[in-house]
Amino acid sequence: MELEYVGKSYDRKDAMMKVTGTAEYVDDLRFARMLYAACVRSPYAHARILSIDTSEAMKLPGVKCVITGDEYPNRAGLYLEDRYFMAKVGDTAKYMGEAVAAVAAETPEIARQACDLVKVEYEELPAVTNAIDGMKPDAPIIHPDLHTYKVAPIFYPEKGTNISHHYILRKGDAEKAFAEADYIFENQFYIPHVQHVPLEPHAAIAKYEANGKLTVWASCQSPYAVRQALSVAFAIPLNKIRVIAPTVGGGFGSKAGTTLEGIVIPLAKHCQGRPVKLVYTREDEFVNAYVRQGMHAKIKAGVRKDGKITALHNEFIWDGGAYTEYGVNITKAGGWASAGPYDIDNVWTDSYCVYTNHPVGGPYRGFGMCEIHFAIEQNMDIIAEKVGLTPVEIRRLNGIRPGGFTGMGEKMEVAGLLDCIDVVVKEMEYDKPSAPAGPHKIRAKGIAAGWKSPSMPSNAGSSAILRMNEDGTFFLLSSAQEIGQGASTVLVQIAAEVLSVSPDTITFCAGDTDYTPYEWQTVASRTTYCAGNAVKLAAENLIDKVLDLAQIKMGAVKRDLEFRDGFVVHKLYPERKLPISDFALGVSFDDGSGYGGPAIGVGSFTLENNIKTDKNTGVAKHHPAAFWTMGMNGCEVEIDTDTGACKVLKMVSCFDAGKVINPTLFAAQSEGAMVQALGTALLEELKLKNGKVLNKSFMDYKIPTADDIPELVAKYVEHAEPTGPYGARGVGEPLMVPGAPCIANAIYNAIGVRFYKMPITSEDILKALKEKEMRL
Amino acid sequence: MKNKVNFFINEEPVELYVDANRTMLNIIRDDLCLIGTKEGCGAGECGACTIIADGKPLNACLVLAPELDGMHITTVEGLAKDGELSELQKQFIKHSALQCGFCTPGFLMSGTALLQENPNPSREEIKTAIVGNLCRCTGYVRIIEAIEETAEVLRGGGQ
């Protein structure tokens, strides 16, 4: 069937507000009598808080309130309830920068001044500053009460250790397969902490009404998840908390959970109806928002002479930081996907989430996949070289196909990886060597594959409401958050397609837990799929209800009627039609009576049969993942042998998107993902020393600028996802996954040096070239 | 001690008494409530607060309030005239040159300043003009294309 609105490049719904500077982000909201918050933060990576004296701070004119950890009755967390929003006296501060007190004052300057007057007495404790050390028997224990924390039933903290989750995957008989293998490869990789760097820093405002109602405006991806965490932390019923997410200036996972919202709430509670605002500084972003967890990977591969991989033994050790309420699931996701997009019969994986006294690890675009693929995809090239295959051949040989099986033993009905390989090979002219470069320059190409599935609770729900207005226009209510990825446009296109009305007639309303319906989270590249399904159901529901009325009004059988171009049309007699607006308020009859209005459609979507894997083997009974999105990157780099500088000349991406709802927005996601991956490959690392973040500004932590970008080619193939709306599956995160290993592989192909860690800086390359020269 | 400053913002005259330690960004956002100009770092490193002052792009977070005196400032709110978007704003929409939108006003101001000075910029000149503006979403390519096409359209219009 020809699609009218899905698959077309509509302009972004949010563009007009954003180009005129009128889109309002949290820091743009101004309320009468607003107060400003600032935090007192621990100067130690690990320290017991002996006492806090707030009396001097309280005396400063303009200070309204000073709070400490006493305000927090309960621990909260998404999967593992392991944190208060502030360290408590008698307990420990677990990373350098953790909030230990907070102030609300008439101006931000007074609040900061008052923080300097809060006296905190600490007893410094030995810190864990490396996840591998954190697993040793004599390591200081960061969460001694870990075994008492409430945890989702798919995570397994180990009592008396720093291990908050140990994910196990045991498929087939790896030991036997290694014994029979022709080659065995063992390699180790390290992926450092990086930061998401949304351009909008985190911000929140809290306000208590006289009736006890709490409203929180938050720069967050998931207003409902924030509401849930705050409800638990402060023991407030859900009907007394309203979370509003206005325009969100980028998230990439850093705004997926709850961060600073928990600080402003108790301040607001003590400030008699006055709103309290807290905006993170850029320095806060690098230290006190989520960071991407560091990861140590060991990969052992058993390989047959012809290049077929028969066995894998993986060990992933994740540096989870001070709290792993979210990190445990990244550890699981990394373990799930540990075979990569390859069909391998025997897989043995241990993935450990380890507490350290580092900034809090959290979800970052790719959710573990960027990290594990840096190892997996370099390993593939290492194997290929040894067995005499090209990087393309080894991926074609091992790549997962329809009917093949994932590392978890899940059967793949749809898998477009091999098509993506073909597209990238063609676009990169990968079969041809690079054109000769100038003097002291070497060029080479590289490829890498990647995949990702959402890693979410099986009851992660989505809902949507469609309201028809009197004139036949619509409001689409959803709490799937527009964070820049284009959700508002894509969801409207899906509704428009079902309703057969122009997307211009649908207004998208999001992000208010009192008025827009439940959405678990805007994460996991699940929005187009999950929220998209809910929207589709809502539109179908509205049509169903309107056609109930139309059959009365039009004297026709319901099955013969349909929505077409703003009319209810008789399929057999198309001249018999009425505008859909005639049914907005129901139908009315000649005798003056009415029936059946106003028109409203509701849709709820829960992924069915999303059965969890076995605890002891990790092997899937059915489909533990909603879908797998897979694809490939290719790139060409140019190395300057005098300076070590690596310039990426071209990057090509091809992914199997199932169905692309909006080709322009897909390309925009793909381009952004490639450049973000380039940043991690060549530039970005959160430098940590004894728990201290050394580079907490853009001066010291460089992200790619316009000067760094290569020629970008964004391609896709479409093998429909059977349960996706119009066959769509999520793409936002998977698109970033192969970028960094692709660049690392190209660098190897250029200079013959393999880098087992990122970023691969100019200094690293120059040093490697010098060492290589000395060896010759 | 407050300093009296007179300046023009989006062609409107303004007279204010300001503390010397405040920044132009504070004045624009908090006193004039022009919230389109964003603070991304407060240290002149991200370009989200770029405005045009006397024809030149400037990070508003690095300018102290007394220096405003006598300046002609344009913010993102001053780009559209009589409800009609500037060509660059239109091209940003057409090229989907924005995602989360937080950096967008800064890019629009850097791009506008470039095109005022150089109606026929090369791709390299465009990159140089926006190299002080950070974007984490787009990968920059659509922003560059939007500025390129704006230059083409404006040149065409002048003929």
Image (cartoon, rainbow, N blue to C red):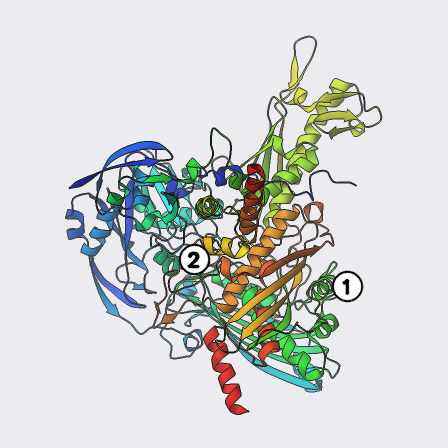
Residue density around tag 1, few if under 14, some if 14–19, many if 20 or more, within 10 Å: few
**Where is residue A773 shown, x and y percent of the image?**
52, 87
Q: Residue at x 50, y 53 (%)?
A: B126
Q: Is residue B20 left or right of residue A727?
A: left
Which residue is the site of mark 2? A81
The picture places residue A739, in percent across and down from the top left corner, at: 58, 65
Q: Say few, some or many: other residues with alpha carbon within 10 Å of mark 2 (under 14 / 14 to 19 / 20 or more).
A: many
Relative horizontal placement of residue A574, taking residue A501 as reference (left or right): right
Say which element carries label 1: loop
Tell me residue A273's x, y (percent). Answer: 30, 36
Residue type of the residue flagged with mark 1 = Gly
The circle on residue A403 is 1
Q: CA distance from mark 1 to mark 2?
A: 39 Å
Q: Which residue in the rendered view is the most extreme toward the top? A: A591
Task: Residue at 74%, 18% (x, y): give it.
Answer: A553
Residue A584 visible to the viewer:
yes
In terms of secondary structure, where does tag 2 sit? loop
Question: Which numbered disc flags the more N-terminal residue, 1 or 2?
Answer: 2
User: Quarter holding the N terminus of chain A?
Assistant: top right
Instruction: For mark 1, name the chain.
Output: A
Q: How many marks?
A: 2
Q: Which residue is painted at 73% across and 74% down in the image?
A: A393
Between A709 and A281, the residue placed more toward the observer is A709
